[in-house]
Amino acid sequence: MIKVSVFSEERAWSKRLKNTDIFFKKICRAFPKKYQFSNKKVLFSLLLSNNKNIKKLNKNFRNKNKSTDILSFPFNKKMKFSKNMYLGDIIISYNYLNKPKSQNLGLFKQKTIKIFIHGFLHLLGFDHKKNKDYFKMLREENFIYKHVKSKIN
């Protein structure tokens, strides 16, 4: 079973997504079976943030003095799945996803789901530093996204 704990430090999130906790838990429940982690308790946290705060985190932890759409901090570099495990933390910037501000709610949700899946895969050890890793991660993102879209829309 996969469980996400959702925290928010940016009020604008709740204006776009009425119940952020339910929204992200619904996404996790719609993940394909291989990411459901049956017979295990897999936990991670999600912080819904903004450009200002994500820029600080990006500077402090990655030495990049700019905002970004998402940051992922895996708890362990090497994945060893046990009965109970904490994957790590994901931080998403509202400002980054809310461009353009005129976008409809459907597009905002679509972008949010995609970036959430991207961050989740980083927690599992996927990256995109090399071209072959980029394509492997992209393939997996698309696989999960199609599965989620078919179940929640």
Image: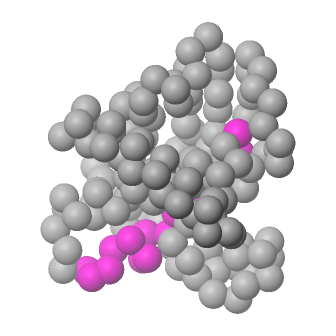
Q: Is residue 134 magenta?
A: no
Which of the 4 quarters of the picture holds residue 115?
A: bottom left
Point 65% across, 20% down: residue: 41
Q: Position of residue 78 (x, y in %)?
A: 83, 42
Q: Is 91 covered by the magenta stretch?
A: yes
Left or right of residue 28, residue 58 in this image: right
Q: Please indicate, yes or no, whether residue 142 appears anywhere in the rendered image.
A: yes
Q: Is residue 89 left or right of residue 10?
A: right
Query: Horizontal placement of 47 versus 114: left or right?
Result: right
Residue 23 seen: no
Image coordinates of residue 52 in percent, x first then y, are 58, 81
Nearer-the-camera pick, 124 or 8? 124
**Range of magenta residues:** 87-101
Please give the name of the residue rendered at 61% of the width and 69% of the height, measured from the top-left corner: 131
Indicate whether 121 appears above or below 38: below
Point 64% across, 80% down: residue: 55
Q: Residue furthest front?
A: 132
User: What colour scheme was applied to this rendering of the protein?
Assistant: one colour
- Indicate the quadrant where residue 85 lies: top right
Name the residue nearer the viewer: 71 or 50: 71
- Which residue in the rendered view is the most extreme toward the bottom? 65
8, above or below 101, in the image: above
Residue drawn at (73%, 84%), measured in percent from left and top?
64
Quarter of the image that includes the C terminus: top left
The number of callouts visible is: 0
Q: Position of residue 81 (x, y in %)?
A: 75, 26
Instruction: Classify 110 as above or below 98.
Output: above
Which residue is outermost to the top? Answer: 39
| Viewport quadrant of the N terminus | top right
